[in-house]
Image (cartoon, rainbow, N blue to C red):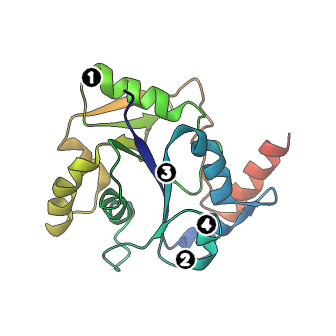
């Protein structure tokens, strides 16, 4: 029997480089950015969760559960992850950011294969040049470890990965899959690239 996989789309940040605009709701080619992410991962998972700390009603319009960080201090992506880990019964949780509209359509398949091959606890994606720390597949049972990490005042996601058997999943054959949008200029460049 194949494992059950849920996903959380992280849209809980403050988007300082986007002028404070809620990145998941910023339009890219006539669709909110989060809709691009939803369309890419929906066929790959059983359930989608959205982590958002503002505009929850707007995010709820996409038809998926919206979760706010358990800790309201904008503690970064780990806060959204730990919240989602507590809300899923799945064997694995896929984590993706709301501002990556070109996510691989075989993301889950390849990451699960990497975990299985290495008997790992999690897999983090790489574009061939660098790891993508908020694109990962992990076991929700790691929630206790993450809670202890956060309770100790730690916030650096890579340091938490280092405490576990984490395998890097290579997507160098899709180098643009993890292009994300942090500034209005990047949004314009990506919009033009998608249009061509």
Q: Are marks 3 and 2 in contact (CB under 8 Å)?
A: no
The residue carrying pointer 1 sits among few (fewer than 14), some (14 to 19) or many (20 or more) residues within 10 Å by Cα, namely few
Q: Is residue 105 above or below residue 154?
A: above
* Image mark for residue 56: 2
Q: Nearer the viewer, residue 71 or 4?
A: 4
Q: Earlier in the sequence, mark 1 or mark 4?
A: 4
Q: Residue furthest front?
A: 1
x 17%, y 57%: residue: 144
Measuring from the top left, give residue 7's x and y in whole percent: 46, 50
The residue where tag 4 is placed is 23
- Quadrant location of the C terminus? top right
The number of numbered discs placed on residues in the rendered structure image is: 4
x 35%, y 61%: residue: 87
Q: Earlier in the sequence, mark 2 or mark 4?
A: 4
Q: CA distance from mark 3 to mark 1?
A: 25 Å
The residue where tag 3 is placed is 47
The residue where tag 1 is placed is 118
Q: Is residue 176 above or below residue 48?
A: above
Q: CA distance from mark 2 to mark 1?
A: 38 Å
Q: Are marks 2 and 1 in contact (CB under 8 Å)?
A: no
Q: Secondary structure at mark 4?
A: helix
Q: Earlier in the sequence, mark 3 or mark 1?
A: 3
């Amino acid at each position: 029997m194949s494992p059950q996989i849920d996903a959380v789309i992280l849209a809980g940040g403050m988007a300082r480089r986007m002028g404070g605009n809620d990145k998941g709701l910023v339009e890219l080619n006539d669709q909110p950015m989060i809709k691009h992410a939803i369309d890419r991962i929906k066929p790959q998972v059983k359930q989608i969760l959205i982590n958002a700390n503002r505009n929850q009603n707007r995010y709820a319009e996409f038809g998926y559960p919206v979760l706010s960080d358990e800790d309201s201090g904008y503690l970064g992506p780990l806060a959204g992850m730990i919240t989602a880990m507590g809300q899923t019964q799945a064997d694995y949780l896929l984590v993706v950011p709301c501002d990556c509209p070109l996510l691989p359509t075989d993301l889950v398949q390849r990451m699960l294969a990497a975990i299985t091959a290495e008997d790992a606890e999690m897999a983090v994606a790489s574009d061939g040049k660098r790891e993508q720390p908020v694109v990962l597949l992990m076991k929700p049972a790691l929630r206790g470890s993450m809670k202890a990490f956060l309770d100790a005042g730690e916030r650096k996601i890579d340091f938490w990965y280092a405490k576990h058997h984490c395998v890097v999943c290579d997507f160098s054959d899709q180098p643009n899959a993890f292009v994300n949008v942090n500034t209005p200029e990047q949004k314009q460049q990506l919009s033009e690239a998608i249009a061509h």
